[in-house]
Image (tube, rainbow, N blue to C red):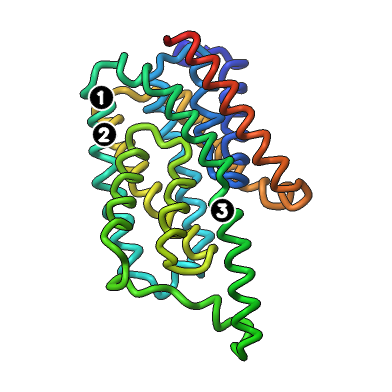
Amino acid sequence: MIAGFSILTLFLILLAGVGAGFVGYAVGASSLVSYPALLALGIPPVLANASNTVGVVGTGIGGLMGARKELKGQALRSAAYIGIGAVGGVIGALLLLGLDPSVFEFLAPLLILFSALMIAFNPRGRMQAKQAARAAQAQLDGAAPGDFDQLVQPMSQDRWWVWLGVVAVAVYSGYFGAGAGTVALAVLDAANIGPFHKINALKTLIGTGANITASVVFIVRGVVDWPAAIMLCIGCFIGGYIAPPITRKIPANVMRAAAVIAGIVLTIDLGIKTY
């Protein structure tokens, strides 16, 4: 036994982390796996959410370390996004802890359903298809293969609603976070800021900034279940690491459909228990 957890339970949390890291890489919704897993193991909703936030921090940091090439030349935008994410994470965390726990329990099924619908909407896949089409057209117009890939819209051209969307994603990430990366992709895609792989790196900045500061709030307030958070973090790292070679062999539609079905089933289950 470790802090009330059996070795078997800790192993199950580790496996949940592996699944969360894998799903996070594949469809951008790691919390869709990790949060309900912590609930199923008997951790109360708010404590499970706070511990989950701490646990998935490693996923974001690893992703940013691997996206240095995509973020090159975007220092100002990167600093702005991670700064907004950091402030939004604090606000979201304080909302989670400041409101009655029943508010979060009431909202959780709806937030998970929202996450599942965003995955079904698939902004990531739409962006990849759109980018491929635009790159092909650019080459037909005489551009070199790498020219289009470098285009990123200057911050001065961003519309006001883009920044409002980034702020909303940051606060949502600190409060719950499931599907936040998918929402961020949808916002940045609608703004036509740049090619998919660079937008994907930028959305990671928002979530990572929010998760780090939200984690600090949760740690200071003493609402983190450390054994669960640590095992989850290790699992997320493993899942994210092994995901790329595996997902190359699995059709994207299959992974997306599985995530959507799981989200809907979980929504119904939590809805019945809550409402």
The image shows residue 59 at horizontal and vertical percentages of 50, 45
Q: Which of the 4 image quadrants contains residue 210?
A: top left
Residue 240's mark?
none
Q: Residues within 10 Å of mark 2 (few under 14, many from 20)?
A: many
The image shows residue 72 at horizontal and vertical percentages of 44, 72
Residue pointed to by mark 2: 217
Residue at image coords 37%, 41%: 211
Viewer-proximal residue among 138 and 71: 138
Up the image or down, 272 lies above or below 128; here it is above
Residue at image coords 59%, 47%: 25
Quarter of the C terminus within the rendering: top left
The image shows residue 12 at horizontal and vertical percentages of 61, 21
Q: Residues within 10 Å of mark 1 (few under 14, many from 20)?
A: some
* Amino acid on which disc 1 is placed: Leu
Separation (CA) of disc 2 from disc 3: 31 Å
Viewer-proximal residue among 76 and 232: 76
* Amino acid on which disc 3 is placed: Arg
Under circle 3, the secondary element is: helix
Viewer-proximal residue among 185 and 216: 185
Separation (CA) of disc 2 from disc 1: 9 Å
* Amino acid on which disc 2 is placed: Val
Residues at circles 2 and 1 in contact by the CB criterion of under 8 Å: yes
Q: Which of the 4 image quadrants contains residue 224?
A: top left
Residue pointed to by mark 3: 124
Of the two numbered discs 2 and 1 on the same chain, state the one appearing first in sequence. Answer: 1
Under circle 1, the secondary element is: helix
Residue 97's mark?
1
